[in-house]
Amino acid sequence: MNTPSNQLVLVLDFGGQYKELIARRVRECRVASELKPGRTPLDEIKKLAPIGIILTGGPDSVYKEGAPLADLALFELGIPILGICYGMHLMAHTLGGQVSPCPVSEYGRITTEIDESSPIFAGLDGSQICLMSHTDQVSRLPEGFKASAHTDNCAIAAMENRARRLYATQFHPEVENTPNGTDIIRNFLYNVCGAAGDYDIGGYRARMLSEIRERVGDRRVLLGLSGGVDSSVCAALLAEAVPGRLHCIFVDHGLMRQNEGDEVEAAFRGRELHFIRVDAEERFLKKLKGVRDPERKRKIIGEEFVRVFEDEAKKLGDVDFLAQGTIYPDVVESGANGSAVIKSHHNVGGLPDDIAFRGIIEPLRGLFKDEVRELGRELGLPRALTERQPFPGPGLAVRIIGAVTKKKLETLRAADAVFREEISRLRVKPDMYFAVLTDTRSVGVMGDFRTYGYTVALRAVKTTDFMTCEYVPLPHKLLGRVSGRIINEAAGVSRVVYDVTGKPPATIEWE
């Protein structure tokens, strides 16, 4: 992520689901970040010469056998360190403190009292809302440390040793549910690490262009172009890197939103891309017939995508690389680098082992959605593409609970189109909104007749990072209008409900 002219903060991963989000927050503060495994050798860390190190959270108890540990020498390098959740436990445990099970576990947004004199809490009010998610806590401080925050149930919610520039928080400053968390990270970077703030998306663009050109050389690249934000930005970046050697294949798998296939084709018509549209609806529906499990759906769709690419590549001749618009949230939720699997993404966990390409190119793998949009604007893409509603690679297949059929797809397309049309009229729109066709059927009444139709669930959330979100409290009048239209315009629907769950504990998509 860094270049020779950039200062670097190293994020050491101990298996936490928010590890990439920590790296993102650092970059949001205009400091380059790089994610490495928690067991990265000290010699390698020294070569990277980071101005600071952040230890991530993780699912383990540091005092149990097999838990990932750190070398004591890590804390003797003289490099400022911030430990978060498990990272705090690791720091305390390694330096002679004690970590124990919590008498009362804490989950969710917790009022936290902080020491305003601490360099990492500078400029903040003494009472903060912070996201807690822990069953262990520091019960005895290491020598030289003091507590710098507490809650009603956690006496040591943060700790510090200012002389050694070692800091730690039990809560997660990287998530949106800690409203001033980015300020805490920024304070660590600038007040403790002495950051200059020399990282921006323009530097990332230059680095990726150089890496792509070096790797591809004079060979050709095949990209699956969905028309979504990620693949569109990926296409623009690749076209700039290897002009004339990018072949974009739009796989119309029959799982798109209403009229979306035609819209995608129109958006890329006339651009300097070799655009190929493949009608593969029957092919995908045949593979998905009777499949109910969402993980199997994703695996099947991921493999079929690659098989279509391979078929088209054979027609094109010698195409060496497959490009994908994979971004950080795809990677972390698919369990990469030791994280727990939340759900496999077709472009991460769904690729077959015997893929018939020289290699995979994923130039957006280090970016979060808001960074991808920023890069798209940097590349000159129109807002119609950069601000497009996020859409999962498996499409409506994972917005239909249970088996996928053509009839269900038609019903969901109609319901989703109604919801998106009504939302589009709002002055301030949610960051993501869509309809889900559930597998629940219920009794209804239309006219004088009994009906037994499907339940459609509506989802609208606000988020900047797609790692956490809150539901949007849409006006009841709007929801009532949407419900009435869906019942009348989407065949087979007898009931409409609204999802009011955040992430966590839910994911944004239902499957």
Image: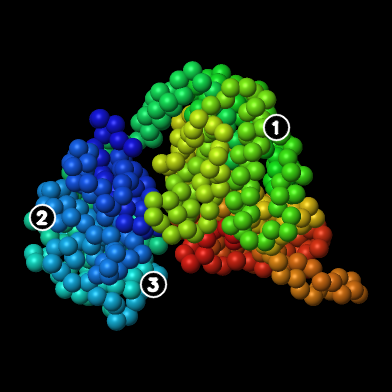
- The answer, for residue 26, to whether it is visible in the render is no
Horizontal relation, residue 409 to residue 48: left or right: right
Q: Residue at x 34, y 70 (%)?
A: 134
Neighbours of disc 1 within 10 Å: few (<14), some (14-19), many (20+): some
Q: Quadrant of residue 164?
A: bottom left
| x then y, percent, for residue 163 | 8, 56
**SS class, disc 2:** helix
Checking the image for residue 277, the label placed there is: 1
Coordinates of residue 343 in the picture (x, y in percent)? 52, 57
| Residue 132 position (above or below residue 369) | below
How many angstroms separate mark 2 from mark 1 (CA)? 59 Å
Q: Residues within 10 Å of mark 2 (few under 14, many from 20)?
A: some
Residue matched to label 2? 164
Q: Amino acid at mark 3?
A: Tyr
Q: Which mark is residue 107?
A: 3
Q: Is residue 92 left or right of residue 269?
A: left
Q: Amino acid at mark 1?
A: Arg
Residue 12 x %, y %: 28, 51
